C-alpha cells in the first residue's frame, strides 16, 4: 500500500496571544510534516464564540511568521495582515464549517451514537450542586439519554432548545494508542456524555476538531496532553463514523522548576512577549524543540533545518518539560554571538543612548559586550558608564590595594603619556594596546596589577568591568584620555 502523505496541523483557538507552549506544539507539527515532505496546516478553532478575541488570528499568524513556522496550507495572513485561506480542504476557519458539523452530529444521532438533550442550564446547574453536596462525581445524569428517539425528534421539530450529546458506553474500557505514551486505558464509566453540538448550533471542540481532522486528511494529531483524557470520546466518534484514526501524540506540558504548569501567573508567557524582550527566533526554536526531546546526547545547537531532519515524535519524553529560562538565555546568548555584526548591532542599537551620535563608538561598545549579553536590552546597564560624560569615582578605589594615592597618580600620568604617544588606530586595536602598555609597565619596573587597576577604574569607575585594553579600544584615544584626566583631577582634589 502506498504510504499516506503526512498531513499535520496546528489548530489554535483565537482566544488571545499565542502561548509559548503553543509554539512548541506548532513547531513539532511543522517538523513532522516538513520531514516527510508533507503538509502543515493552520486551522483556526473558533467555535467557542464567547472566547473569541478580535485580532487574535492575525496576531497568531504574525507571531508564527516571525518565528519562521510557516504552514503551507490553511489560514494565513497576506502582506497586508489580512486573513487568507489556502488549500483544497477549506474552509480552515472552523466556525465556517458549522453546517458540516451539524450534519455529522445529526448522523451520529441517527446512528444511535448521540442523542438530543433538552435539559436546561438551570437543571444542569442544580444537578451539579446536588452532586457536589452528596459528594458524587459531577457529570450528566443521563436523563435525556432515555428519551425515545422518535419523541426526541418531535420535540426538536417543535422547536424545543437542545444540545447533542454523545451516547458513550457506560461499561468496559477503551485504550488510546499514543506515540509518546504508548497504550493508555480509560474506564468508560468515568467518562461523561460529552456535548458535541451546543444550543447555538456550533459544534464543541470534540466534534469539530475530529470532523475537520478527518475531512482535511490529517494523519498526525499533535496536541497538548490536556486532551488525552478526552481522546476516548474522540475515538468513539471516529469509530462511529467509520473513519480511520489518525496518529495521536499528546505533548507533555511545559512546567516550572517546581513542576507547576507554566501559566500566565508566572508573568507574560505569550510567544510575542519573548520576541519583544529580544529572544531571537532561532534561539526560541532551538530551545523549544529540545524541551522534552534531544536527538543527540552531545549536541545542543540545532538549526531549524537540522531539527526537521532529526525530528522523531516517538522520542519525546512523557514527563513535563522544564521551561528553564537560564537555558533559553544560554541559547539566546549563543545566537546573538553568531549574528553577523550588522545584524547584531541593529538589535542592540535601540538600547544605546540616542544622544550619542558617534555610531562607530556605539558599534565598538556593542561589540565589547557581545559575549556577555543574553538579551540585547542588557547592553544598556552594562555599558551605560561608557556614555556618561563624567564618571563618579567616589564609590570605587582608584588606588591599588595598599598603594598610596601618589602611586596611582604616577601610574595614571604615565598611562596617559603612553596612550598619547600611540596613534588612534593602535589604540582601537586591543592586542596592540595591550602589548604596548604591558611593555611600558615592564620598562618602568612596575607591576601589572598596580598600574592596570587605576587605569581600568579610571575608565569605568566600576569594581568589575572589561579589561582596560578592551575599554580603551572601545573608547578610542580621545575618550580614554578624557577619562584619565578626570580620574587624575579627582585624585588631586
Ligand atoms: N483548539 C484546540 C486548542 O487550542 C486545539 C487542540 C488540538 O490541537 O486539537 O487547544
Image (tube, rainbow, N blue to C red):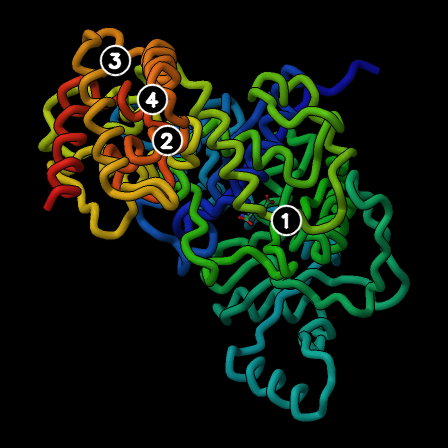
User: Would you identify the image quadrant in which residue 129 lies?
Assistant: bottom right
List x then y, in percent, for residue 212: 58, 39
Mark 1 or mark 2: whose residue is earlier in sequence: 1
Residue corresponding to mark 1 = 322
Q: Which residue is at a point 53% across and 40% down the rendered structure image?
A: 11
**Distance from label 1 to label 2 (Cα)?**
34 Å
How packed mark 4 is, by other alpha carbons closer than 10 Å (few <14, some 14-19, many 20 or more), is many
Which numbered dot is residue 427?
3
Callout 4–callout 3 Cβ contact below 8 Å? no
Mark 4 or mark 3: whose residue is earlier in sequence: 3
**Distance from label 3 to label 2 (Cα)?**
16 Å
Callout 4–callout 1 Cβ contact below 8 Å? no
**Distance from label 1 to label 3 (Cα)?**
47 Å
Dot 4 falls on a residue whose secondary structure is helix
Callout 1–callout 3 Cβ contact below 8 Å? no
Answer yes or no: is residue 290 visible: yes
Q: Which residue is at a point 33% across and 27% down the rendered structure image?
A: 468
**Distance from label 4 to label 3 (Cα)?**
8 Å
User: Would you identify the image quadrant in which residue 260 lies?
Assistant: bottom right
Amino acid at each position: 500500500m502506498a504510504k499516506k502523505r503526512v498531513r499535520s496541523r496546528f489548530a489554535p483557538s483565537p482566544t488571545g496571544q499565542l502561548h509559548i507552549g503553543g509554539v512548541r506544539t506548532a513547531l513539532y507539527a511543522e517538523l513532522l510534516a516538513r520531514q516527510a515532505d508533507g503538509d502543515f496546516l493552520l486551522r483556526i478553532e473558533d467555535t467557542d464564540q464567547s472566547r473569541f478575541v478580535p485580532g487574535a488570528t492575525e496576531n497568531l499568524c504574525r507571531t508564527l511568521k516571525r518565528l519562521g513556522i510557516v504552514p503551507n496550507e490553511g489560514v494565513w495572513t497576506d502582506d497586508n495582515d489580512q486573513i487568507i485561506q489556502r488549500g483544497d480542504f477549506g474552509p480552515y476557519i472552523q466556525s465556517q464549517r458549522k453546517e458540516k458539523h451539524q450534519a455529522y452530529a445529526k448522523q451520529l444521532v441517527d446512528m444511535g451514537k448521540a442523542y438530543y438533550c433538552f435539559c436546561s442550564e438551570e437543571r444542569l446547574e442544580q444537578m451539579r450542586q446536588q452532586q457536589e453536596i452528596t459528594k458524587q462525581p459531577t457529570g450528566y445524569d443521563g436523563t435525556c439519554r432515555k428519551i425515545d428517539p422518535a419523541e426526541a425528534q418531535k420535540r426538536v421539530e417543535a422547536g424545543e432548545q437542545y444540545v447533542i450529546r454523545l451516547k458513550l458506553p457506560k461499561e468496559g474500557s477503551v485504550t488510546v494508542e499514543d506515540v509518546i505514551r504508548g497504550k493508555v486505558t480509560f474506564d468508560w464509566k468515568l467518562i461523561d456524555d460529552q456535548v458535541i453540538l451546543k444550543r447555538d448550533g456550533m459544534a464543541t471542540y470534540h466534534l469539530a476538531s475530529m470532523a475537520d481532522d478527518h475531512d482535511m486528511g490529517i494523519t498526525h494529531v499533535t496536541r497538548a496532553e490536556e486532551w488525552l483524557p478526552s481522546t476516548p470520546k474522540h475515538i468513539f466518534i471516529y469509530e462511529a463514523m467509520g473513519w480511520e484514526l489518525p496518529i495521536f501524540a499528546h505533548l507533555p506540558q511545559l512546567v516550572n522548576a517546581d513542576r507547576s504548569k507554566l501559566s500566565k501567573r508566572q508573568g507574560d508567557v505569550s510567544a510575542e512577549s519573548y520576541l519583544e524582550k529580544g529572544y531571537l527566533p532561532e534561539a526560541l526554536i532551538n530551545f523549544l524543540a529540545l524541551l522534552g526531546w534531544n536527538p543527540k546526547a552531545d549536541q545542543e545547537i540545532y538549526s531549524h533545518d537540522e531539527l526537521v531532519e532529526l525530528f522523531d515524535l516517538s522520542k519525546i519524553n512523557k514527563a513535563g518539560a522544564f521551561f528553564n529560562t537560564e537555558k533559553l538565555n544560554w541559547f539566546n546568548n549563543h545566537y546573538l554571538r553568531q549574528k553577523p555584526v550588522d545584524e547584531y548591532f541593529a538589535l542592540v542599537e535601540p538600547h544605546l543612548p540616542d544622544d550619542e551620535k558617534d555610531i562607530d563608538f556605539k558599534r565598538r561598545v556593542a561589540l565589547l559586550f557581545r559575549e556577555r549579553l543574553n538579551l540585547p536590552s542588557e547592553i544598556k546597564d552594562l555599558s551605560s558608564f561608557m556614555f556618561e560624560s563624567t564618571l563618579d569615582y567616589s564609590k570605587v578605589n582608584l588606588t591599588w590595594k595598599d598603594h598610596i594615592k601618589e602611586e596611582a597618580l604616577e601610574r595614571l600620568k604615565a598611562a596617559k603619556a603612553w596612550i598619547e604617544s600611540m596613534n588612534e588606530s593602535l589604540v582601537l586595536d586591543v592586542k596592540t594596546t595591550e602589548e604596548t602598555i604591558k611593555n611600558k609597565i615592564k620598562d618602568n619596573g612596575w607591576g601589572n596589577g598596580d598600574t592596570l587597576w587605576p587605569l581600568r577604574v579610571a575608565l569605568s569607575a566600576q569594581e568589575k568591568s572589561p579589561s582596560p585594553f578592551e575599554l580603551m579600544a572601545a573608547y578610542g584615544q580621545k575618550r580614554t584620555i578624557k577619562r584619565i584626566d578626570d580620574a587624575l583631577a579627582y585624585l588631586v582634589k
